Image (cartoon, grey):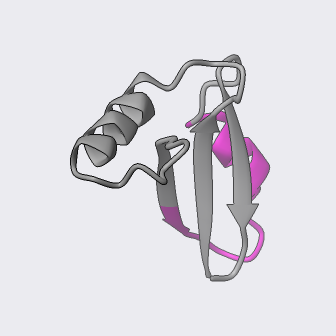
Amino acid sequence: MKSKVTTMLRPSILDQQGKAVQDALHRMGFENVTSCRIGKTYEIDHTDDADLVEITKSIYNEVMEDYIIERDI
């Protein structure tokens, strides 16, 4: 099986990389971009009985990030 875990900084945390991309897009003429946030995506191959929540807890920063698990992609 394959699942996808996406981690993003929590909304209350300033995403400096996202802000830099937003500023670059504005300089390129894309003034309609109002926000940009950058995250990480992990594709995990696993057996049916893998505990994806526990796996995810070992790869994300619980203080600064939220995560979404998409199973069986």
User: Which residue corresponds to the image point at 65% horizontal and 74% vertical from the top-left?
Assistant: 47
User: Which residue corresponds to the image point at 47% horizontal and 47% vertical from the top-left?
Assistant: 40
State yes or no: residue 36 in magenta.
no
Q: State which quadrant residue 67 falls in.
A: top right
Q: Quadrant of the C terminus?
A: bottom right
Q: State which quadrant residue 30 falls in.
A: bottom left
- Residue 55 to residue 23: above or below: below
Please tell me which residue lies in front, 17 or 67.
17
- Residue 30 to residue 24: above or below: below
- Indicate the position of residue 69 as horizontal and vertical percent values: 72, 59
State yes or no: residue 57 in magenta.
yes
- Indicate the position of residue 70 as horizontal and vertical percent values: 71, 69
User: Which residue corresponds to the image point at 65% horizontal and 21% vertical from the top-left?
Assistant: 64
Instruction: State the residue lying farthest toward the left.
Output: 28
Please tell me which residue lies in front, 10 or 44.
10
- Indicate the position of residue 21 as horizontal and vertical percent values: 33, 40
Give the left or right position of residue 58, taking residue 38 as reference. Answer: right
Q: Give the range drawn in magenta.
A: 43-59
User: Which residue corresponds to the image point at 59% horizontal and 33% vertical from the top-left?
Assistant: 60
Please tell me which residue lies in front, 23 or 51.
23
- Residue 18 to residue 32: above or below: above
- Indicate the position of residue 36 as horizontal and vertical percent values: 49, 43
Q: State which quadrant residue 4 falls in.
A: bottom right
